[in-house]
Amino acid sequence: MNLSRLRFATGLLLAYAVLPGARAADPTGRTYARPEARIGPYTIVLDRIRESRTAVSHFGSAAAGGELRRSLQLDLAVYADDAQSNQGLTLFQINSVTAAVGARLVEIPYTGGMLESPGDPAAVRVFLYAQSFPASAREIRSIQGDIVAYERAGPVDLEIPLANRTFPFSVEQKGVRVQVQELQQEGVWTRIVLTVDAPSAAVLLNTLQDGTYGISLLDERGRPGVSNGCRMEQPRPNAAEYRAAFERLRGVPTTLRIRLAYRGGARRVFPWRLNRVALPSRPGAAREPAGPNRKAGAPGTDLPTEKR
């Protein structure tokens, strides 16, 4: 999804939120059941709809008349039944959004991105933004996509003894092969280069965002060196190379610790679909501006009664 196409419209903003196990009401008091889809160990929910409508009037030209502009933002979330399914979720994909316009179905172009909130119980939370949504549409007919997940997932903690080793050397722990290619000490600095390989169907992930990439180096008394930066490269999803630097290691480096996330086993695809999502009604509506193809006062699409 191309975030560079994202734009913001001005107008009256309508929003209603639907929390798990609840119903929501729009500004007119009309209630809605939570739109959701269930597939495998995952529940996909539409948490929130934000609707914006703007009326634009043109004067003094051949194109004089009224124009309606309508946009929608949809917030979706995925909840997993258990921690294993949560950690195994690799990809949440949205393939299409369609709206009902009279008797026709119209595919809606959209952009979007990730939403993050500390302590969020959702496995994934995203938003979709449809900048040009049909003004007369009363429902979203469908939102379709896929979830890609692995059968097994979870953190992997490895502890590699370094004492009395000749470099390079390899060890295998918990189904992961680690090759320590080099270890160099220069003054207060210690540098280490290593590669990690998992089975071909697996995916290796970094679990920490603090710049260490889960790599730590300890001396013979278990005292860690101070990380001075680490670089991680992944030539393949199941392989990673680490180049890490440490300073002020007070003794001889004897233990290498690695913490990473591992996804393996069968790769499963779960197609999902949200059907017939009703759009919120609007309070206190005005009429569409008169134009050359519409008589003043004729029934038209309701507009917000907000002064511009």
Image: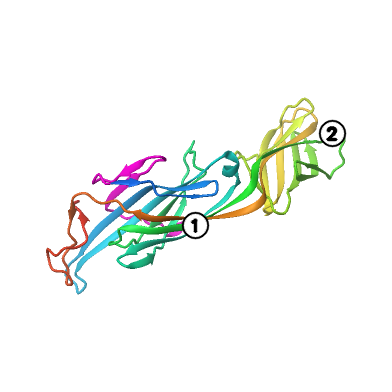
Toward the viewer: 16 or 82? 82
Residue at mark 2 to residue at mark 1: CA–CA distance: 51 Å
Q: Quadrant of residue 230?
A: top right
Amino acid type indicated by mark 1: Gly
Picture layout, residue 225 above or below residue 75: above
Residue 175 in the figure: left or right of residue 269: right
Q: Secondary structure at mark 2?
A: loop
Point out the stretch of residues depicted in magenta.
2-30
Q: Is residue 104 magenta?
A: no
Picture quarter containing residue 23?
A: top left
Q: Camera-side residue: 108 or 100?
A: 100
> What scheme was used to colour the molecule?
rainbow
Query: What is the number of the mark on residue 163?
Result: 2
Count of numbered circles in the view: 2
Q: Residue at point 46% right, 58% down?
A: 144
Residue 174 point in image, percent of width and height: 75, 41
Q: Residue furthest bottom?
A: 62
* Apparent side of residue 14 relative to residue 205 in the rendered image (left or right): left
Q: Earlier in the sequence, mark 2 or mark 1?
A: 1
Under circle 1, the secondary element is: strand
Q: Which residue is mark 1?
A: 145
Q: How far from the left and from the top, in percent, is residue 121? A: 49, 38
Where is residue 145 shown, x and y percent of the image?
49, 57
Q: Amino acid at mark 2?
A: Ala
Q: Is residue 147 left or right of residue 49?
A: right
- Mark 1: few, some, or many residues within 10 Å (few <14, many ≥20)? some
Q: Which mark is residue 280?
A: none
Q: Is residue 125 above or below residue 104?
A: above
The answer to whether residue 4 is magenta is yes
Can you give x and y, in whole percent of width and height, for residue 171 in the image? Answer: 81, 42
Q: Is residue 73 left or right of residue 124?
A: left
